[in-house]
């Protein structure tokens, strides 16, 4: 029995390493295919953490709203729900104070935070949209971020217009999608 414990620990740690290698490989592919510079990708990741931290530090926002911010190419998409304009405006002001440099796209809806069921459905919609995009050989899905909030699909990325149009068409024709909102930055072919 004493000999099995070290063996089990060794196998568990090796399995974790394999998972880390797979995640690293997929992440590496995303970095290589991304039109954004490595610095911009890192800035966006840091901005996501900063936004999450600043919103999470405010008790009223944490307890009464469902607000998230996502940075892409220096711009920020703010989504979710706030019960009133005062809390929505507070969240936007806090993110502006971070001085991230780009535009802030305010897509926060006034209303009660969505339920667990709605959020689960949103996750399922995102999965369906990404799956359909992945199946389209004419679309480079590694350059597009898909986020669903209360049935609204937000598409972000630094892409060519043709790719953006194709992504919108795929999302628009996916079951459960109520609306598609483009938040793309465009590159020239």
Image (spheres, rainbow, N blue to C red):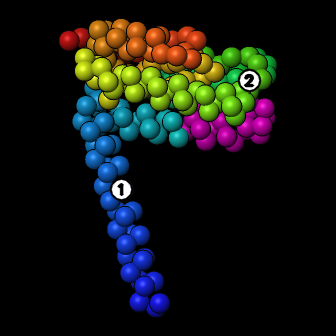
Classify mark 2: helix, strand or loop.
strand
Please tell me which residue is depicted at 25% across the width and 17% down the height of the picture. Answer: 138
Percent position of residue 4, x then y: 42, 85
Other residues around mark 2 within 10 Å, as few (<14) / some (14–19) / many (≥20)? many
The dot on residue 31 is none
Please tell me which residue is depicted at 51% across the width and 12% down the height of the picture. Answer: 180
Other residues around mark 1 within 10 Å, as few (<14) / some (14–19) / many (≥20)? few
First in residue order: circle 1 vs circle 2: 1
* Magenta-drawn stretch, dominant element (helix, strand or loop): helix
In this rendering, the label closer to the viewer, 1 or 2: 1
Query: Is residue 61 magenta-colored?
Result: yes
Percent position of residue 189, x then y: 20, 12
Indicate the quadrant where residue 52 lies. Answer: top right
| Magenta part of the chain | 50-69
Indicate the quadrant where residue 78 lies. Answer: top right
Q: CA distance from mark 1 to mark 2?
A: 37 Å
In the drawing, does residue 95 fall left or right of residue 138? right
Query: Is residue 44 magenta-colored?
Result: no
Judging depth in this view, the residue of 126 and 181 nearest the camera is 126
In the drawing, does residue 91 fall left or right of residue 75? right
Residue placed under numbered mark 1 in the picture: 20
In contact (CB < 8 Å): disc 1 and disc 2:
no
Please tell me which residue is depicted at 48% across the width and 16% down the height of the picture. Answer: 174
Q: In this rendering, is residue 153 above or below 29?
A: above
Judging depth in this view, the residue of 181 and 76 nearest the camera is 181
Could you tell me if residue 79 is visible in this image? Answer: no
Indicate the quadrant where residue 51 lies. Answer: top right
Please tell me which residue is depicted at 36% across the width and 56% down the height of the picture. Answer: 19
Residue placed under numbered mark 2 in the picture: 82
Percent position of residue 85, x then y: 76, 17
């Amino acid at each position: 029995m004493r000999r099995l414990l070290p063996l089990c620990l060794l196998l568990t740690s090796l399995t974790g390493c394999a998972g880390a290698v797979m995640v690293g490989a997929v992440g590496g592919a995303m970095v290589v295919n991304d039109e954004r510079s490595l610095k911009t990708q890192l800035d966006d990741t840091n901005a996501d953490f900063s936004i999450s931290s600043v919103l999470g530090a405010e008790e009223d926002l944490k307890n009464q709203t469902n607000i998230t911010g996502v940075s892409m190419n220096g711009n920020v998409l703010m989504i979710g729900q706030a019960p009133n304009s005062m809390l929505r405006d507070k969240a936007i002001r806090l993110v502006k104070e971070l001085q991230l440099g780009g535009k802030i796209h305010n897509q926060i809806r006034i209303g009660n935070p969505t339920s667990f069921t709605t959020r689960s459905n949103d996750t399922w919609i995102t999965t369906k949209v990404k799956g359909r995009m992945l199946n389209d050989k004419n679309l480079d899905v590694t350059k597009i971020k898909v986020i669903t909030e209360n049935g609204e699909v937000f598409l972000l990325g630094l892409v060519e217009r043709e790719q953006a149009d194709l992504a919108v068409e795929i999302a628009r024709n996916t079951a459960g999608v109520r609306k598609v909102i483009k938040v793309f930055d465009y590159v020239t072919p």
